[in-house]
Image (spheres, rainbow, N blue to C red):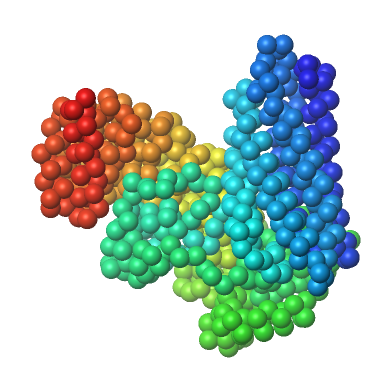
Amino acid sequence: MAGGEDTLVTAIFLLDLVRQICSVGISVAGDKNKNDSVFRKDCMDLVRRVSLLTHFLEEINGQLGKLDALGSSSSSSKEMNWWSDLVAALQSAHNLLSLAGSFQSTNNSDGTAKNIVTLFHGVTWKLEKSLANVPYDQFDISEEVQEQVALVRAQLRRATERYGSMNSREVSFPFSQQIDKDVDQAQMGNRLTGSCHVENSGSVNHKVAGNIETSVSGSNGSTGRTADPVASESNAVDLAKKGSLPKKSTEDLKKPDTLKIPHDFLCPISLELMRDPVIVATGQTYERSYIQRWIDTDNSTCPKTQQKLEHLTLTPNYALRSLITQWCTEHKVEQLTGLAKGRIKKSDGSFRNVSGDLAAVQATVRRLSSRSIEERRAAVSEIRSLSKRSTDNRILVAGAGAIPVLVNLLTSEDTSIQENAVTSILNLSIYENNKGLIMLAGAVPSIVQVLRAGSVEARENAAATLFSLSLADENKIIIGASGAIPALVELLENGSTRGKKDAATALFNLCIYEGNKGRVVRAGIITALLKMLTDSRNRMIDEALTILSVLASNQEAKVAIVKASTIPVLIDLLRTGMPRNKENAAAILLSLCKRDPENLACVSRLGAVIPLTELAKGGTERAKRKATSMLEHLRRLQQH
């Protein structure tokens, strides 16, 4: 390929190929004869990942002819291969979709089916490898598109691992039920829901250190986690003893759920077990609340097939609801408490009729849009109070359609309305199912605006809301790209005590995603953390060390930490800090000094050997390990 017109033609070809793949996916989803294919979910997952590459290809389309890597006669074959590899991988995906989408299970089809599993394994691997070789630094790509590509690659890696594990054992039908949901383990947030504050009941979680074990070890999304995070394994257990987390052992927190929910029972929007399944005009089934919110936000297409809805009638899928109820009973699964036909299902399986309450809440929601500012103030204050009281109320308020209206009120110039609106959204977000509705309503940009310019209380609760929403890994990416990080760092540095704690919690959670670490560094977080470490009042040393421990494995952050003269402060904490401070300080120093003789020499010159020796003898178990490892590195340095 020579460059110029040739590369432009190739770019258009790739875009057309991606669109063809999406068309095949629509065909698989919409063709009734293909709906029974055991590989239908696998096909749709592959199509969804490939479709996310459209924006990337569109952005680089006009840039290809200018690249030396493509247009220069001196370009190496290695530089050229990424393009042909991507074409080959997409062509393989297109061919596989045509084959797998039409495959039907029979008594004699096990061998063919296992071959198709192998093909899915190979295609996902080829796609991920071809995307890994793209010279991204030579293109002018927006951050949002970069993150989309990173998300696709992470999903492909996980899918490759799953298909690989399937190939290594006997496989029974249907395959799509054996493959874990291709999401960034958003449900890990459920384990932290108890640490998210409802207004006036304390900060979201002022002990951010305790979240590390569940967020880092318990989730395997595209977050760039290290295998052995600097964060303390004992933190989760310590906080569990204090009541900040469910009283589970570290091993319990790491255990994945073994029961696989049939994929037909999951809502395509929320990927959660459906309670009130309804059928739309295209024949697809969704959870009523999620598809209703989709329609309420001016969408007129089917989310799954992208086909235009001929009508907006939602028809109850009684047959599927009966099957879900039967499956839940057989497997002793408690169906999620939620709103269906004016009733809320309780954890004991019984129903509570809330039709009267729902009508009252709906009336209050309608008042949120009143022309009278006094009436709007009263209504949003009432919604805030309702959402504060109970889970049932959070279900009712969301079910009444309050979330999109509350999002609109976030930009109100009236301070009282804005404060109550953002606090209502915070309270509603504590119920896990509401998180998706809040994101679907496009709340993040307005929450960031409140974070930047709202009142003291509004800024605090905006930060707390971002933490609550960021428990889902895909939301970490969206929030990180929204401009929230500089505003959170500013609150961390200059906010009230509670505001600083809420900002610290949100920033910690966002930094679990590797792509956000550079952002927080560029936003000036290291300076803010150093001030917290040297504050004589010792108010937020734990929070500062916890965030530093997450950042220390990132190269850009590592350089900034050392440049800010943080090493002497960490060594001082080894001498005078509380046991937990010493443990985290030793862990951070170890991370900074690994494969870095210059930092190691600095630690040696500053007299760290004595406090490290003491810590290796009398510290916590983890502190002993980290201190011993540091001392071994120092001994090797002296020998050289």
Q: Nearer the viewer, residue 330 or 376?
A: 330
Q: Establish if 298 lies above or below 154.
A: below
Task: Specify whether 523 is left or right of 366.
Answer: left
> Residue sitting at 59 percent across and 40 percent down?
150
Quadrant housing the N terminus: top right
Q: Quadrant of the C terminus?
A: top left
x%, y% of residue 3? 77, 17
Q: Residue 474 appears at what percent x and percent y?
A: 57, 50
The quadrant holding residue 169 is bottom right
Image check: 104 left or right of 236?
Answer: right
User: Between residues 229 and 524, which one lies in front from this camera angle?
Assistant: 229
Residue sitting at x 69%, y 69%:
172
Q: Is residue 130 left or right of residue 395?
A: right
At a point 53% along the width and 86% down the height, the residue shown is: 348
Q: Residue at x 46, y 73 (%)?
A: 389
- Residue 334 vertical placement versus 150 (above, below): below
Residue 2 in the image, given as x and y percentages of width and height: 78, 16
Q: How many marks do you count on the picture?
A: 0
Q: In this orientation, which residue lies closer to the viewer: 541 or 53?
A: 53
- Residue farthest along the bottom direction in this orientation: 350
Q: Looking at the image, which is closer to me, 388 or 224? A: 224
* Left or right of residue 448, residue 526 in this image: left
On the image, the x and y values in percent for residue 221 come to: 53, 51
